[in-house]
């Protein structure tokens, strides 16, 4: 009987595994795989290699993301090494330095944010969260990073992929900052995402998951080739792979899912289409579900087809059961509050 129960349990587990959703495919996987080829050292190596410097010891999300983004750029594809040190002489040998050195100077390719007088924010996007090393790299290289990812996706396009027009890049750059980068800046600089009392703690953020890749205080390095520094450097590589994977997944979702939905939402929001649903024009119907909220707010701002802000109150779309669902348009993109 015990064996029968065990077989049934194993069959049930196997069935659950088979039915579980697969992880999303990373079209730009080659960019992450390249990180395994990057040398991570304690000191600057041979001449002729481009060198990106950052601090050694405990690592955080911001410098891992800053370095990973830089390593997607064409200028850092080959003959490059990563140097993790706080030695000023070693950092001086580096072509570019992030999150250490006490200097923010784009002309000198120095991107630290720990200076007492540092108060840089993404003012060009009307944001007031102080920038981390990742935010500084994104400010100066973000559009190039996104273009590199776009090229990698185009080399391995998913079904139904719609090429991204160059004119869309500023919008994608802004959405990636607001939807991904800004929280990294905020957490690294100790900026709360809310005002008022904290109701619960978030312990699974990207920054927290990177932090858990650091070795524990009682780690045994005696059997590890290269000792503690080599172990930390290898863990830093894993941190870069983690943050770059999630960065690319977030961007891929925008260009392979969010962007193709724009044309569908446009068609539903024409005055003719809305008034065919209801004479008021305040209700729109989608032929199938797709990401619609941010497109609606963008199209309202653009005055698409004479559309005014707040004009559309409800969005209808069919669900998987064959019936329809209705959602009220929130007051702001991504919000829960509905107009009164």
Image: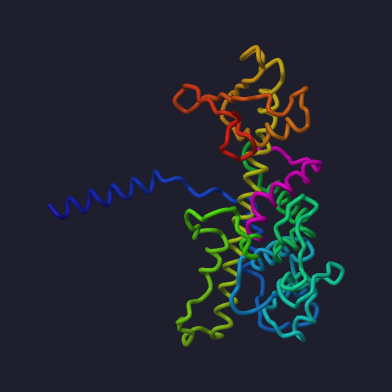
Q: Quadrant of the C terminus?
A: top right
On screen, residue 194 above or below 65: above
Residue 210 relative to residue 135: left or right? left
Quadrant for residue 289, please give it. top right
* Percent of width and height locating residue 211: 54, 68
Q: Nearer the viewer, residue 156 or 130?
A: 130
Number of numbered tags placed on the structure image: 0
* Percent of width and height locating residue 227: 54, 85
On screen, residue 209 above or below 128: below
On screen, residue 272 above or below 131: above
Residue at the spot 59% in from the left edge and 51% down from the top edge:
26
Q: Is residue 192 magenta?
A: no
On screen, residue 126 above or below 285: below
Residue 197 relative to residue 263: left or right? left
Residue 306 relative to residue 41: left or right? right
Q: Is residue 181 magenta?
A: yes
Quadrant for residue 54, please give it. bottom right
Quadrant for residue 108, please give it. bottom right
Extreme-right residue of the structure: 107
Q: Nearer the viewer, residue 205 or 79?
A: 205
Magenta extent: 161-185
Main SS, magenta region, reads helix
* Percent of width and height locating residue 177: 70, 52
Residue at the spot 60% in from the left edge and 33% down from the top edge:
330
Extreme-left residue of the structure: 1
Residue at the spot 78% in from the left edge and 71% down from the top edge:
117
* Percent of width and height locating residue 167: 81, 41
Q: How is the image coloured?
A: rainbow
């Amino acid at each position: 009987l015990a064996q029968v129960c065990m077989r049934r349990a194993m069959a049930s587990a196997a069935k659950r595994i088979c039915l579980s959703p697969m992880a999303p495919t990373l079209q730009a996987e080659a960019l992450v795989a390249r990180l395994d080829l990057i040398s991570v050292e304690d000191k600057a190596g041979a001449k002729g290699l481009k060198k990106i410097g950052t601090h050694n010891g405990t690592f955080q999300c911001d410098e891992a993301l800053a370095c990973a983004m830089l390593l997607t750029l064409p200028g850092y594809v080959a003959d490059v090494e990563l140097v993790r040190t706080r030695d000023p002489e070693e950092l001086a040998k580096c072509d570019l330095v992030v999150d250490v050195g006490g200097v923010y100077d784009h002309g000198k390719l120095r991107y630290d944010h720990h200076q007492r007088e540092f108060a840089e924010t993404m003012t060009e996007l009307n944001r007031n969260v102080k920038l981390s090393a990742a935010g500084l790299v994104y400010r100066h290289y973000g559009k190039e990073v996104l273009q590199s990812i776009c090229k990698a996706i185009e080399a391995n396009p998913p079904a139904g992929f719609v090429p991204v027009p160059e004119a869309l890049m500023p919008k994608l750059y802004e959405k990636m900052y607001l939807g991904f980068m800004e929280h990294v800046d905020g957490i690294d600089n100790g900026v709360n995402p809310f005002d008022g009392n904290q109701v619960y703690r978030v312990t699974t953020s990207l920054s927290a998951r990177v932090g858990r890749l650091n070795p524990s205080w009682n780690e045994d390095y005696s059997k590890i080739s290269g000792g503690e520094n080599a172990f930390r450097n290898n863990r830093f590589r894993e941190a870069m792979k983690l943050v770059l994977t999630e960065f690319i997944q977030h961007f891929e979702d925008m260009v392979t899912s969010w962007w193709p939905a724009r044309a569908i939402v446009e068609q539903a929001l024409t005055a003719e289409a809305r008034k065919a649903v209801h004479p008021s024009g305040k209700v729109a119907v989608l032929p199938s579900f797709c990401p619609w909220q941010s497109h609606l707010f963008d199209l309202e701002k653009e005055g698409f087809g004479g559309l005014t802000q707040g004009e559309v109150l409800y969005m209808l779309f069919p669900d998987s059961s064959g019936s329809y669902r209705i959602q009220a348009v929130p007051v702001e993109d991504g919000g829960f509050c509905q107009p009164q």
